[in-house]
Image (cartoon, grey):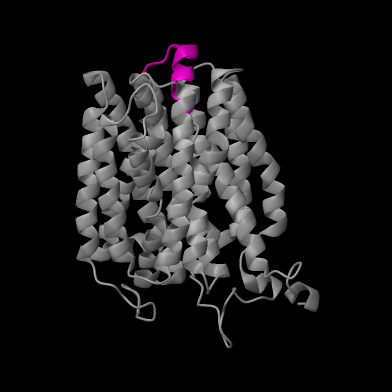
Amino acid sequence: MTTAQRAPVLGVHRAWWVAAVTLGALVAAAGFRSSTGALLEPLESDFGWSRTTTSGAVTLNLVVYGLTAPFAAALMERFGVRRVATAALVLVGVGSGLTIWMTSAWQLWLLWGFAVGIGTGALALVFGAIVATRWFERHRGLVVGAFSAASSTGQLIFLPSIAHLASGPGWRWAAGLTAVAALLLAPLLWWVLRDRPGDVGLTPYGAPAGWRPPPRVTDRSAASLAWRALRTGARSWPFWMLVITFWICGWSTNGLIGTHFIPAAHDHGMPATTSAGLLAVIGIFDIIGTLASGWLTDRYDPRLLLFGYYFFRGVSLLLVPFLLGPTVQPSLFVFVVLYGLDWVATVPPTVALCRRHFGPDLGAVVFGWVFASHMVGAGIAAAYAGWIREARGDYLLAWLTAAVLCLAAAGLCLTVSARREDETPVGVG
C-alpha cells in the first residue's frame, strides 16, 4: 500500500468522504420511498385504481424493502458493500424509470413492490450502519444519526418537487426525477466507496493506537450468515424487544405518516402541495432530532433515549387528528415539532443496542432483521390505514391505534439491561 493511499484526501480522513457518498446514496433511495404518499391520488385519478390497490402496492414495497435488509447486510459482508450498494442504486433507478410506461396495477406492484423494494431495501439503514461501524470508532453514533436523517433529507429534497410535478406535468415526471438521480449517483458511489478502511491502508476514524480489525464472519454464503444472525438473536429477549419496538416504529412512520398523511390531510380540505410541504418541515425537524439522537447515543443509555422517543411520538399521534384542517394553523406545528424530532431518532440507539448485544459484524446483520420488522410493521400499517379509510371514511382509528402502540413501545424499552460493548455478545463464545 503506497503512502498516497494512506494519506488523507484533501486533508480529510477518507472516512468522511465515504460517509458523504453513503449519505448521498441513502438520500437518493429515500427520494422514491418518500414519493409514494404524494403519488397515491394521482395514480388513482389516472388509472381509476382504488385506495386498496395503491395501498397494497405500497404495502408490498415496504415488506420487500424490509425483508431485503438482512440479506443485503449479509451480501455486503460476503461480497462487499461497494458492489451491492452500487447495484442497488442502479436497480432503484431502473425500477423508478420503468414506472413511467406502466399501464396495469400488476406492473405497479411489480415495479414499486419488488424492483424498487429490493433496491431501496439494500440501501436501507443497514447499509449506513455497516459503513459507520467499519469506518468510525469516534463519533459513530453521530454518523449513524446523520445516515438515519438521510430519509428525512430525501423527503425534504424530493417530496415538495414530487408533489409539484405530480400536480403539474404529472406523476411520470416525478418518477423520472428519482430515476435520474439514482442512476447519476451510482458511478460516484463506486468511485469513492470502499468496503473497509484496510482496503486503502487506513484504520477507522478515531481508532486508538494498536487498533486491530475485529474477526470477520466466516459464513460461506450470505443466506447462511443471515439465518445465523436470526438464530443467534432469537435466543435473547433484547432481540425481541428491538424487533417489537422497531415494528411499531415502522407502523407509526413509513406505514402511517409516510403513506397516508397527504391523503388524510386532503380529507380535511388541505391541498396536497401544502401537506407535502408540512412533511418537508417534519423532515427538517427530523434531521435536527436524529443528529441530536446520534450525539446523545454516544453519551447516554440508549434504552432511556428510546423510551423518550416512543413516548413523545405516541403523544403527537394522539394530537394530529384533532389538528388537521383546510389550512395550517399554529397548533398543527405542535405535531410537526413533536413528531418531527423523533421520526427516525430511534435508529442510533437501536443500532447501538444491536452492536452491544451481538458484536460489530454480526450485530449489523441482526440489525437487518430488526429493520425488517420495521418495514413489515410499516407495510401492515399502510394496508390497515387504507382499509380503515375505506371502511369508516376517515383515519381517526388509524391515528389512535398508532398512538397506543407507541406508548406500549416506550414501556418495552425499559425491559432490557444495558450491556457494555466489551462483554461477550449474546449467543457467541
Image-based side of 330 in relation to 219, left or right: left
Most foreground residue, 96 or 292: 292
Foreground residue, 285 or 22? 285
Q: Quadrant of residue 237?
A: bottom left
Looking at the rendering, in which quadrant would you find the N terminus?
bottom right
- Give the magenta range: 38-50
The question of residue 47 being in magenta is answered with yes
Q: Is residue 129 visible?
A: no
Is-magenta flag for residue 261?
no
In this view, which residue lies farthest toward the bottom? 210
Residue 161, image quadrant: top right
Give the total number of marks visible in the rendering: 0
SS majority, magenta: helix
| Residue 140 position in % (x across, y down) | 50, 68
Pinpoint residue 230: horizontal percent, then vertical percent. Answer: 34, 60
Is residue 163 visible in the rendered structure shown here?
yes
Q: Residue at x 36, y 25 (%)?
A: 265
